[in-house]
């Protein structure tokens, strides 16, 4: 099938359709469904994919491929896909995976840190955002609540929401 993302370009006051046709010979993009699209502070664009040999793709602001990060790159993804992307205030890229796993990638130093904090409840992260203080907030799957990474203490904290939220699924923060 066809996988695409519509991106609004304010300078042209128009949408650009980023297309990915899995298996098409002319496609330089990986086969797989796009999970998340994130624009970094420097204007570059990151895409995460589901079930592909190249789960992270770096594009320039004109959607030209700059780099493909496959599973062999420093153990970037243990389970062949990334979920959500966020950039912290130090410009490190946080990529969530299943089972409460997070990969923290420093594109400048070319280093990778793998985390699986118990505060992420060994579950998928449905949403991630950075607040004004620079803390990262993680919306967890199915009744698992919220988690926060405190940028000052460098520690995670879990918040149980089961008594206050009936459905228990956090799709956006």
Image: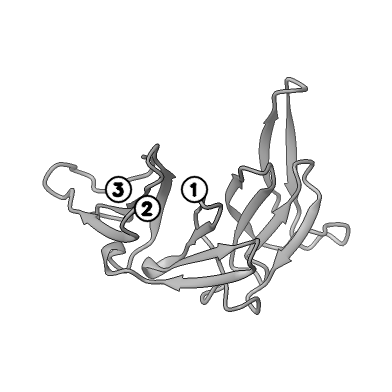
What residue is shown with label 2? 151
Q: Residue at x 65, y 79 (%)?
A: 72
What residue is shown with label 3? 169
Disc 1 packing (10 Å; few <14; some 14–19; many ≥20)? some
Mark 1 or 3: the one toward you: 1
- Relative side of 139 to 22, left or right: left
- Relative side of 167 to 141, left or right: left
* The C terminus, quarter of image: top left
131 or 159, which lies in front?
131
- Residue 103 at what x, y percent from top left? 49, 67
Eyeballing the image, is 37 above or below 72? above
Q: Residue at x 27, y 65 (%)?
A: 121
Disc 2 packing (10 Å; few <14; some 14–19; many ≥20)? some
Disc 3 packing (10 Å; few <14; some 14–19; many ≥20)? some
At numbered mark 3, what does the secondary structure look like: helix, strand or loop?
loop
Q: Which of pointers 1 and 3 lies earlier in the amino acid sequence? A: 1
What residue is shown with label 1? 89
- Residue 171 at what x, y percent from top left? 38, 44
- Residue 162 at what x, y percent from top left? 16, 50
Pointer 2 with pointer 3, Cβ within 8 A: no
Pointer 2 with pointer 1, Cβ within 8 A: yes
């Amino acid at each position: 099938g066809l996988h695409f993302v519509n991106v609004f370009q304010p300078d042209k006051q128009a949408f650009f359709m980023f297309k990915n046709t899995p298996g098409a010979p002319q496609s330089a993009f990986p086969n797989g469904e796009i999970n998340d699209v994130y624009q970094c502070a420097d204007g570059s664009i990151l895409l995460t994919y589901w079930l592909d040999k190249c789960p992270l793709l770096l594009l320039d602001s004109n959607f030209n491929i700059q780099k493909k990060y496959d599973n062999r790159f420093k153990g970037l993804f243990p389970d062949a896909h990334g979920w959500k992307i966020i950039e912290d205030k130090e410009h490190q890229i946080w990529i969530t995976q299943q089972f409460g796993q997070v990969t923290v990638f420093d594109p400048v130093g070319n280093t990778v840190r793998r985390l699986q904090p118990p505060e992420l409840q060994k579950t998928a992260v449905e949403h991630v955002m950075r607040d004004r203080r620079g803390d990262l907030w993680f919306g967890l799957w199915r009744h698992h609540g919220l988690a926060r990474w405190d940028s000052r203490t460098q520690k995670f904290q879990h918040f149980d929401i089961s008594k206050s939220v009936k459905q228990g699924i956090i799709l956006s923060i």
